[in-house]
Image (spheres, grey):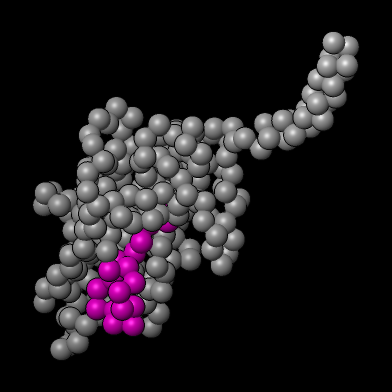
Amino acid sequence: MGFQLWFYFIILFLLCPILQSTESQQAICGEEVCGNVTIPSPFGIHSRCYSRSWFRVSCKQTHKGEKPFISINGIDLELLGSLFQDTILIKNPVSYVNCDHKGEVGSSTVNLTGTPFFFSSDYNYFGSVGCGNLATIFSNEADPLGGCIQPICGDGASESGCYNRISGNFTSNVVNMTAMYPTGKDDDKRCASAFIFSRLYFREDYPLPIGIHIETTHVPATLSWNSTYCGDAGQSLVSLSVFHLII
């Protein structure tokens, strides 16, 4: 009996470091880390850290190291962190019109329909890079949300643009480009972009946030969610950006 008890203590002594190491490696929900980003609750990498698939985070290896992503209606969005409760910062794709060199890059926007997520007017602005156009944004229900006038075309116009507030929350959108300063037959070929970006991430004393230009493919945007949302997951949807150029 004494030998068995002694043997038990030896096994326990040997197992303790292993058990402690395993426990230390278990993620603490709300404090999980992927790359240099701390994953905020209710999002999580491990299944015990999120209660619904909307909030599942995948930690993926990229050429710039590990990056966290969430998947919304078939689009992977890089998670940049959290600024306020019930909001996260994501890399939001930019949409283009008449930019042949961009090919398919940015040809779609994030459609949040059928999810608990939405873009809030409290945290985001509408912006556009280009020249000579009135850029306007509407909800998919055709409700106007905002717009801005790009500067007159000239030297450096591709590096400038405009931005303005948006008037309501929305889950999907349509953008119109209307030529304001017609100069000739190439008016309908001006390369321009449009995007939703987080107003909390940039200073407001510039025509456009520093670092955003016609080559920018993604911008930081603030995503909010309805904590009482009870809808089902729905099917994967990608909303194509709709642009119209009116002379």
Does residue 126 appear in the picture of this structure? Answer: no
In the rendered image, the quadrant that contains the N terminus is: top right
Q: Position of residue 142 (x, y in %)?
A: 11, 52
Q: Quadrant of residue 128?
A: bottom left
95 w.r.t. 231: above or below? below
The stretch of residues the image draws in magenta is 90-107
Q: Position of residue 218 (x, y in %)?
A: 41, 63
Q: Pick whichever, 159 or 33, lies toward us.
A: 33
165 w.r.t. 162: above or below? above
Residue at x 51% of width, y 39% of height: 46
Q: Position of residue 68 (x, y in %)?
A: 50, 51
157 w.r.t. 117: above or below? below
Left or right of 8: which side holds 197?
Answer: left
Whether the magenta-drawn stretch holds residue 101 is answered as yes
Residue at x 41% of width, y 49% of height: 70
Q: Pick whichever, 153 or 129, lies toward us.
A: 129
